[in-house]
Amino acid sequence: MKEIMRARRQSFAGLLIFCLVGLFFVRSIPADELSDSDKFFLAGYEKLRMALVADDLVRVNEAAAELSESGFEVPKSETLERARDAFAKASEIAIKVAAGQPGYYVMHCPKLNRDWVQTSSQVSNPYGGKDMVGCGEIKK
């Protein structure tokens, strides 16, 4: 019985070391550089985010049109609420594209349980508009 326990501890220790070494190597691999298409998407996404922060539906639809013309489907919205719903879907893509890239921050609003990407570390929440602009924190 003692030998079985010793073998399990050794197996566990070996697995733990393997995982820690793997984690070190994964963290040291740099993120791929952004393609021109990704850069264009993130720039348009940032325009859309800033328009939502300002509660400016005209600018929201202008930014959505720019993105849509380039192949990123962002529908024109009749209300800020619908625009924010569309933005949430675009945020899912933006979070994946910006992952590990310098100069991009994934933010989280705990009150609304929503995530987004922005280029500043200072919180500028697009989901609550002017009333909740400061609600959020850096997620990653």
Image (cartoon, grey):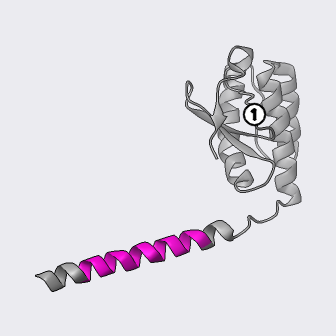
Q: Is residue 134 above or below residue 115?
A: above
Q: Is residue 4 above or below residue 92?
A: below
- Quadrant placement of the N terminus: bottom left
Q: Is residue 79 magenta?
A: no
Given residues 139 and 116, the one toward you in this image is 139
Quarter of the image holding residue 31? bottom right
Picture coordinates of residue 36 (x, y %)?
A: 89, 58
Q: Is residue 16 magenta?
A: yes
Given residues 97 and 19, the one toward you in this image is 19
Whether residue 127 appears in this view of the structure is yes
Q: Main secondary structure of the magenta part?
A: helix
Category of crowding for the residue at label 1, using alpha-carbon neighbours closer than 10 angstroms: few (below 14), some (14–19), many (at least 20): some
Q: Which residues are magenta?
A: 7-24
Instruction: Name the side, left or right, on which 135 lies relative to 66.
Output: left
Residue at which label 1 appears: 75
Secondary element under disc 1, as helix, strand or loop, is: loop
Picture coordinates of residue 4 (x, y %)?
A: 17, 82
Picture coordinates of residue 51 (x, y %)?
A: 83, 26
Picture coordinates of residue 13 (x, y %)?
A: 36, 76
Q: Residue at x 70, y 23 (%)?
A: 134
Whether residue 79 appears in this view of the structure is no
Given residues 66 and 20, the one toward you in this image is 20
Q: Residue at x 54, y 74 (%)?
A: 22
Given residues 5 and 47, the one toward you in this image is 5
Q: Amino acid at mark 1?
A: Pro
